[in-house]
Image (tube, rainbow, N blue to C red):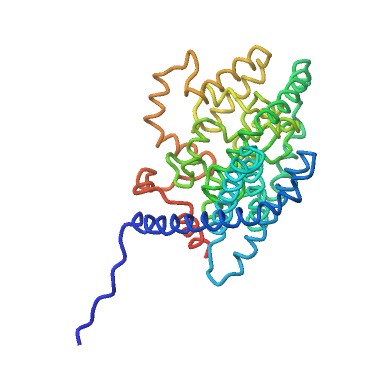
Amino acid sequence: MISRPPPSRPSNPYERRSSRFAFGLLGYFVLTVVLFYLVWSYTPRLADRVGGIDNGWLQFGIYFVIYIGLIRGATVAGRRVAVRLRRETLLRLCFAAGATLSFVVAVYQARFGTGLSATYFTVGVLGTFAGVLLATRRYFGLIEINAPPSPEAVAEVLQAHQHVVLAEDTWDHLKRGVELLLSLALIILSLPISVLLAMVVWWQDPGPLLFAKIVVTRGGSSFRQFKLRSMIKDAEQATGAIPAALDDQRVTAFGQVLRRTHIDELPQMINIARGEMSLVGPRPERTIFVRRHLTSMPHYTLRHAVRPGLAGMAAIYGDYYSTPREKLRYDLLYIRRRSFGLDLRLFLNATLVGLIGRWPGMNRGRRLFTARRQEQRWREAYEALHGGPAPDTPQSEQRSGPVATPEEFHGKVAEVRD
């Protein structure tokens, strides 16, 4: 009897993705048809009960709560069906269903209702997003803290700063008042774009919206520095706290855009409003790294005489892979010369770097030279932070091949963890 070889699977992972996408598109089409039928059948009954409410805020608030309830019910039901889905896939399906329902209701309102189709669609999408966030909070949490320091490390760093004289001149007090007003205003004004960014971050890899690093502030205290999550979940689960490499596979596609434009640092307005950070000052350093730096640089505590800043001199005139000793020189220089004029210039330069990638007077030759040496700069930063040699495999070899998707990377992390 001649044995037949088992059917071979397609070797290219992108072929499997394309077939899954085709089935997903077909399912989405069927879902849309079903939702159109349900809306056309049951929306008039709901409109008769809610439409009589004169208060528009109350009326749309009821619709918002209804969407939250529907999505929460869908996520609970999805976990109990016979077909087992990954949590990320289930959350995406629920969000797609809620967004489609919002679109159908908006079309119905434009044709037969009040005509506020855009408002109905916006309320529906926001309610859907709130519903999936409730499920996300239960499954993964909304704030991820990777490689947190031990309580002993936090206490040791705080104890090492007991002798530091905090900056308390007139400009420091005026600066705090101005930053409080600006940060609150920016939080309010940036709320719409923040919601859109959060949706994109969540959709690419359903999970925590914010990434928090435990860093050191003025006087040696530690706090959580917030950022929009630009990496996949559990990015440091297998590696611990390490500097991001060039074209790091842990960074998502949208995360690359966030990092390049520095929009991922928008949530740090919350840290500034709470008095943990400043608009301009030395860049915050993780507590676990500060503890290590203090063994070789006892005067490293002097940089914490002021609050850490969103824009720093080391970030403007140095580069991403500057060693801690190089950054410390810039930080101490800033502390000695800090003033309104210097803070304004650093903040404007940082804004220009985020928008166009350069600031007036930038030494282009030095930047090009640094770019050519980024592999070596990464190794120097790694060795300075970890006190040991960087991995032998060059980063370019580690990153060869197609960039891993969040699902593939989560699988690799699970293998290492097991």
Spot occupied by residue 114 in the image (x, y as percentages of width and height): 67, 39
Query: Quarter of the image holding residue 161?
Result: top right
Spot occupied by residue 407 in the image (x, y as percentages of width and height): 48, 56
User: Closest to the observer: 249 or 152?
Assistant: 249
Relative to 44, is 190 above or below? above
User: Closest to the observer: 232 or 346?
Assistant: 232
Task: Give me the residue at 34% from left, 49% from top.
Answer: 401
The residue furthest left is 2
Residue 210 is at least partly visible in this image: no
Task: Give me the residue at 50% from left, 17% from top.
Answer: 359
Relative to 122, is 173 above or below? above
Residue 368 is at least partly visible in this image: yes
Relative to 267, is 107 above or below? below
User: Closest to the observer: 117 or 3?
Assistant: 117
Q: Is the N terminus in the top left, top right, bottom left or bottom right quadrant?
A: bottom left
Spot occupied by residue 291 in the image (x, y as percentages of width and height): 64, 41
The residue furthest front is 112
Spot occupied by residue 299 in the image (x, y as percentages of width and height): 65, 30
- Looking at the image, how many numbered discs can be counted on the residues? 0
User: Closest to the observer: 320 or 403?
Assistant: 403
Query: Quarter of the image holding residue 265?
Result: top right
Task: Give me the residue at 44% from left, 54% from top.
Answer: 25
